[in-house]
């Protein structure tokens, strides 16, 4: 089983299927996520698809998404 480290070039994550939100802006500038073997989640910047990926556990992503859904980060980007 491969252990993925933070900062790994996203192109070195073989078989990754990158997904981004349908809310992404028309220029495609967004973050993308991919499920990793073993259950981890990789995150990359869609403007730099070969750049570094950050690696998170499923629990870490779940907690972040709960906070985002609850509006905890709205002040960082303005109200929607």
Image: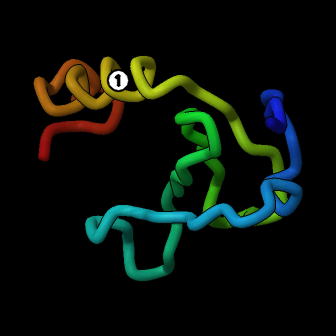
x 54%, y 49%: residue? 35
x, y percentage for residue 26?
Answer: 39, 81
Q: Residues within 10 Å of mark 1 (few under 14, many from 20)?
A: few
Q: In the image, 74: left or right of 30?
A: left
Q: Residue furthest front?
A: 1
Q: Nearer the viewer, residue 14 or 54?
A: 14
x 66%, y 31%: residue? 55
Note whether 10 is above or below 42 in the view shown.
Answer: below
Mark 1, secondary structure of its residue: helix
| Quadrant housing the N terminus | top right
Tally of marks: 1
Q: Which quadrant holds residue 7?
A: top right
x 69%, y 35%: residue? 54
x, y percentage for residue 51?
Answer: 83, 54
Q: Nearer the viewer, residue 55 or 68?
A: 55
x, y percentage for residue 31?
Answer: 52, 53
Q: In the image, 56: left or right of 64?
A: right
Q: Which quadrant holds residue 64?
A: top left
Q: In the image, 69: left or right of 30?
A: left
Note whether 10 is above or below 53 in the view shown.
Answer: below
What colouring does the structure picture have?
Answer: rainbow
x 11%, y 24%: residue? 70
Q: In the image, 5: left or right of 32?
A: right
Q: Which residue is mark 1?
A: 64
x, y percentage for residue 47?
Answer: 67, 66
């Amino acid at each position: 089983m491969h252990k993925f480290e933070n900062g790994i070039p996203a192109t070195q994550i073989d078989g990754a299927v990158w997904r981004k939100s349908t809310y992404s802006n028309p220029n495609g500038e967004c973050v993308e996520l991919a499920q990793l073997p073993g259950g981890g989640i990789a995150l990359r910047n869609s403007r730099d698809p070969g750049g570094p990926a950050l690696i998170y556990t499923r629990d870490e992503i779940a907690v972040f998404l709960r906070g985002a859904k609850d509006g905890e980060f709205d002040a960082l980007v303005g109200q929607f």
